[in-house]
Image (cartoon, rainbow, N blue to C red):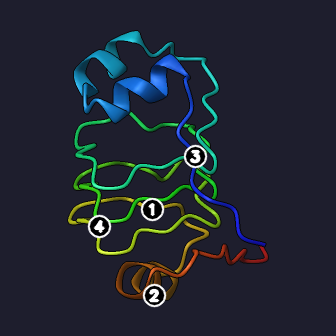
Amino acid sequence: MNIRPKITDNPMYQLLREENIKEFNAQRKSDEKLDFSYCDFRNLDLRGMNAEGIDFSHAYFRQADLRGIDFSQCRMEGSSINSARISGTYFPMALSADEITLSLLHGTRMRYHYHKV
């Protein structure tokens, strides 16, 4: 299955595409469910983005600047972070360090690992 990253006309997504993080955070409603699955975030500087609860599954973050972003409450299964800048970034608990490293270095899609409680 070869699904290409998409660019949508969603106004909130367009703010991120324009790297207007301050306006994105200001316009974001606290209970708003944003679905950016399969979206293209290549080469964007997203530092400072409020990512809480956003669905980034299968998104494409090649060479994006993700430093300091808290993705811990996001869906990121199937996304790729090839050559992204990730210093200080929090990822969902279901993503192992190995999955993050493989995606960062080789562009693999990150797979979730669920721990039985």
Nearer mark to the viewer, of 3 and 2: 3
Depicted 105 relative to depicted 62: above or below: below
Q: CA distance from mark 3 to mark 1?
A: 22 Å
Pointer 1 residue: 91
Which class describes the residues within 10 Å of circle 1: few (<14), some (14-19), or many (20+)?
Answer: some
Q: Which of disc 1 and disc 3 is earlier in sequence?
A: 3
Nearer mark to the viewer, of 3 and 1: 3
Left/right placement of residue 47 relative to residue 95 reads left
Q: Which of disc 1 and disc 2 is earlier in sequence?
A: 1
Left/right placement of residue 104 relative to residue 103 reads left
Pointer 3 residue: 6
Which class describes the residues within 10 Å of circle 4: few (<14), some (14-19), or many (20+)?
Answer: many
Amino acid bearing label 2: Leu
Q: CA distance from mark 1 to mark 4?
A: 13 Å
SS class, disc 2:
helix
Amino acid bearing label 4: Ala
Per the rendering, the mark at residue 109 is: none
Pointer 2 residue: 102
Q: CA distance from mark 2 to mark 1?
A: 14 Å
Per the rendering, the mark at residue 84 is: 4
Q: CA distance from mark 4 to mark 2?
A: 12 Å
